[in-house]
């Protein structure tokens, strides 16, 4: 399956142009990108060019520097997943030697719009995805074009990727869903750097919903070759998250229906007991969130040596068994308070190293690891990136059901997942006695435990209007309650955008 890069030189050159850098306004469409007209005209001669351009957008999701910096925290979607886990409080910076993530852990970036890490790179990355998707959409004929069979799948993926980028922008830059607030500019065309006003949040959501509904229809019969591609089930998953983030009863029910659609549509099994942790059984060869072929993964990327990833990568920040900052002293651990809430019989507790006398206490060394399990061993990254797995939709379905008073359905979905985390049903039988807010709180807790380190806790924090209270193993802000909509937990529109867009105050 290691064949992402085995494409023609022509298509690679188009893809590479989508990852190049410039310092133009907003940089949602830098001047050294190919223009929409060029993509369209070339696509008429070489129909595969549009597909190659689309692969370039996917490559941005795991390529270093796509946030416009040379920082070692700038490595695509998994970089922003890690940022969000820090903001949620579920990942603790418990020791620091090289000053990576210090400003984020101190929550300085969220109150200083001049900071590149966090504010600038996040904004630039997601608007570059949007700008690139817009080029593809415009080259095919525009947002309302009548799509031919030849370009239907490309258009569907481009619209889904545009919505994916807007969704993460809403989560990072908007404290909570308030329809009339104005934060994000909407770009739907190849604007070539023309400034636009901030749009109402409700309009941003309408656009995401429209794009994802279009994508679901356009991709209805898409049989993808690689898991890095968006298919109809990934689009449904993204739309479920969009609706769930709104918090209204009507939106919750739509999110529930979509989450169930993902579970049924993929037919993917839950991550098994053995796959959950290296320490699940003696001699385990299944554990480790490092392989895109894991059946429960429904969106992820098969990382090859051709990708050129090394220290500047998710693995280079988080894996003790990779040549990494974690192994060298920048230790990222599970929050002590969250760890303490994991049942001793829960296999997920074995994901973490426990030795209070060690600087590596509570690292996730049995969840995310290179299979050779040699300290600082992996130098050139071949372990894969996960973006989405079916387990999260069992939890999202349970959460939406509980919020809408369907306690039985919520308990059943939650117990299905827990049946793969405990050996004995008696260990999770307590779920049958939970109702109302107690049930909602339990699902939220299990979501944090299950998806630790996968970039989903921040989304759950906002959906559940939670409060962050950092445990004793954090270096900063220990024990300080912070509500989900606290300014310290929301990014600032970057200085460059404020200075260059006259419509932003």
Image (cartoon, rainbow, N blue to C red):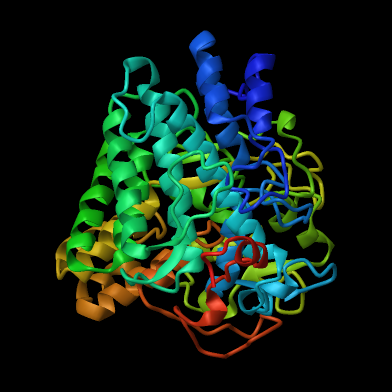
Q: Could you say which quadrant of the image residue 476 lies in?
A: bottom right
Whether residue 256 is visible: yes
Against 294, is 278 above or below?
Answer: below
Q: Could you say which quadrant of the image residue 159 lies in?
A: top left
Residue 366 point in image, percent of width and height? 62, 56
Which residue is at the front of the view, 30 or 355? 30
Which residue is at the front of the view, 409 or 491? 491
Question: Residue at point 85% right, 71% down?
Answer: 97
Quadrant position of the N terminus in the picture: top right
Horizontally, residue 307 falls left or right of residue 227, namely right
Q: Could you say which quadrant of the image residue 310 lies in?
A: top right
Against 495, is 383 above or below?
Answer: above
Residue 425 point in image, percent of width and height? 31, 62
Question: Residue at point 52% right, 42% down?
Answer: 191
Against 244, is 14 above or below?
Answer: above
Whether residue 267 is visible: no
Count every numbered label the image shows and give the total. 0
Which residue is at the front of the view, 274 or 51? 51
Horizontally, residue 7 falls left or right of residue 446, namely right
Q: Residue furthest top?
A: 45
Residue 49 point in image, percent of width and height? 55, 18
Residue 90 point in image, percent of width and height? 55, 71
Question: Residue at point 81% right, 42% down?
Answer: 379
Quadrant position of the C terminus in the picture: bottom right
Which residue is at the front of the view, 214 or 200? 200
Question: Residue at point 31% right, 23% down?
Answer: 147
């Amino acid at each position: 399956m290691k064949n992402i890069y085995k494409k023609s030189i022509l298509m690679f050159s188009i893809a590479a142009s989508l990852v190049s850098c410039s310092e133009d306004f907003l940089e949602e469409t830098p001047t050294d990108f190919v223009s929409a007209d060029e993509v369209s005209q070339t696509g008429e001669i070489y129909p595969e060019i549009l597909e190659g351009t689309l692969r370039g957008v996917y490559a941005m999701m795991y390529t270093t520097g796509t946030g416009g910096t040379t920082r070692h925290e700038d490595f695509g979607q998994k970089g922003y997943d890690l940022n969000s886990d820090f903001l949620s409080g579920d990942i603790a910076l418990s020791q620091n030697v090289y000053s990576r993530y210090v400003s984020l852990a101190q929550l300085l970036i969220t109150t200083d719009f001049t900071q590149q890490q966090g504010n600038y790179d996040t904004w630039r990355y997601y608007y570059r995805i949007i700008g690139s998707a817009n080029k593809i959409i415009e080259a095919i004929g525009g947002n309302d074009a009548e799509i031919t069979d030849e370009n239907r799948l490309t258009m569907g993926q481009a619209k889904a990727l545009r919505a994916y980028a807007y969704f993460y922008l809403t989560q990072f830059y908007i404290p909570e869903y308030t329809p009339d607030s104005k934060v994000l500019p909407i770009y739907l065309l190849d604007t070539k750097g023309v400034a636009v006003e901030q749009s109402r949040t409700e309009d941003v959501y309408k656009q995401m919903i429209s794009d994802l509904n279009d994508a679901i229809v356009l991709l209805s019969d898409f049989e993808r070759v690689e898991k890095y591609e968006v298919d109809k089930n990934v689009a449904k998953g993204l739309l479920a998250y969009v609706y769930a983030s709104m918090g209204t009863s009507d939106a919750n029910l739509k999110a529930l229906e979509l989450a169930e659609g993902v579970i049924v549509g993929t037919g993917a099994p839950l991550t098994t007991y053995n796959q959950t942790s290296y320490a699940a059984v003696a001699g385990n060869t299944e554990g480790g969130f490092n392989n895109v072929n894991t059946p429960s993964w429904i969106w992820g990327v098969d990382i090859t040596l051709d990708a050129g990833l090394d220290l500047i990568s998710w693995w280079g920040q988080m894996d003790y068994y990779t040549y990494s900052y974690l192994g060298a002293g920048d230790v990222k651990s599970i929050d002590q308070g969250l760890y303490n809430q994991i049942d001793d019989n829960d296999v997920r507790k074995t994901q973490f190293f426990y030795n209070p006398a060690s600087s590596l206490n509570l690292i996730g060394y049995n969840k995310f690891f290179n299979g050779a399990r040699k300290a600082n061993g992996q130098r050139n990254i071949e372990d894969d990136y996960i973006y989405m797995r079916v387990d999260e939709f069992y939890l999202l379905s349970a959460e939406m059901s509980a919020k809408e008073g369907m306690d039985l359905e919520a308990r059943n979905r939650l117990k299905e997942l827990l049946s793969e985390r405990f050996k004995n049903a008696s260990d999770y039988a307590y779920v049958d006695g939970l109702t109302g807010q107690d049930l909602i709180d339990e699902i939220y807790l299990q979501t944090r435990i299950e998806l630790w380190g996968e970039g989903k806790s921040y989304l759950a924090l906002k959906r559940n209007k939670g409060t962050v209270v950092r445990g004793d193993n954090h270096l900063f802000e220990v024990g300080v309650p912070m509500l989900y909509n606290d300014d310290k937990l929301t990014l600032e529109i970057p200085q460059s955008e404020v200075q260059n867009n006259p419509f932003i105050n």
